[in-house]
Image (cartoon, rainbow, N blue to C red):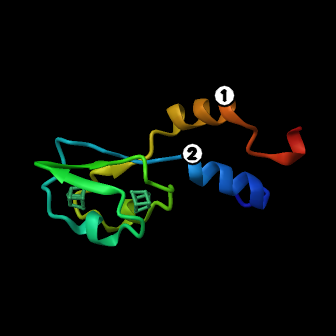
Amino acid sequence: MGCASRKGKLVMHSQTKPVVKQKLCTACGRCVVNCQVNAIKIDEKAFITNKCVGCARCIAVCPENAISILWNESSETLKKNDRACLWCQ
Ligand code: SF4
Ligand code: SF4
């Protein structure tokens, strides 16, 4: 991602949202307190709401590795909505 433009990175981050693997989540709440936009809620298990801006901090702080980005689905979303790289236009 080092060669991506600033616009491309912003598009990528804004549209690339992580998901919580429900089986692994212990509802410890660490991701909730570390989310800067209050995008994570817990209802028995954590889940990520539409407020997420894709910063990926929750992925780094989860002690169970329960949060990840589904890159295949995300890239499809990027292809549908916009091009991430201005050089390709
Ligand atoms: S940090 Fe991980 S284990 Fe803890 S609530 Fe969030 S997703 Fe679940
Ligand atoms: S990626 Fe960032 S904004 Fe989205 S839920 Fe995780 S910590 Fe919050």
| In this rendering, position of residue 45 left or right of residue 20 | left
At label 2, the amino acid type is: Gln
- Crowd around label 2: few <14 · some 14–19 · many ≥20 (10 Å): some
Front in this rendered view, residue 35 or 65:
35
Task: State which image quarter holds ligand 1.
Answer: bottom left
| Residue 56, x across and y down, in percent | 46, 60
| In this rendering, position of residue 62 left or right of residue 79 | left
| Residue 60, x across and y down, in percent | 38, 65
Dot 1 or dot 2: first in sequence order is 2
The residue singled out by tag 1 in the image is 80
Would you identify the image quadrant in which residue 26 lies? bottom left
Residue at 67% x, 50% y is 11
Front in this rendered view, residue 4 or 55:
55
Residue at 50% x, 62% y is 55
The residue singled out by tag 2 in the image is 15
Residue at 76% x, 61% y is 6
Query: Which of the image's four quarters has the N terminus?
Result: bottom right
At label 1, the amino acid type is: Lys
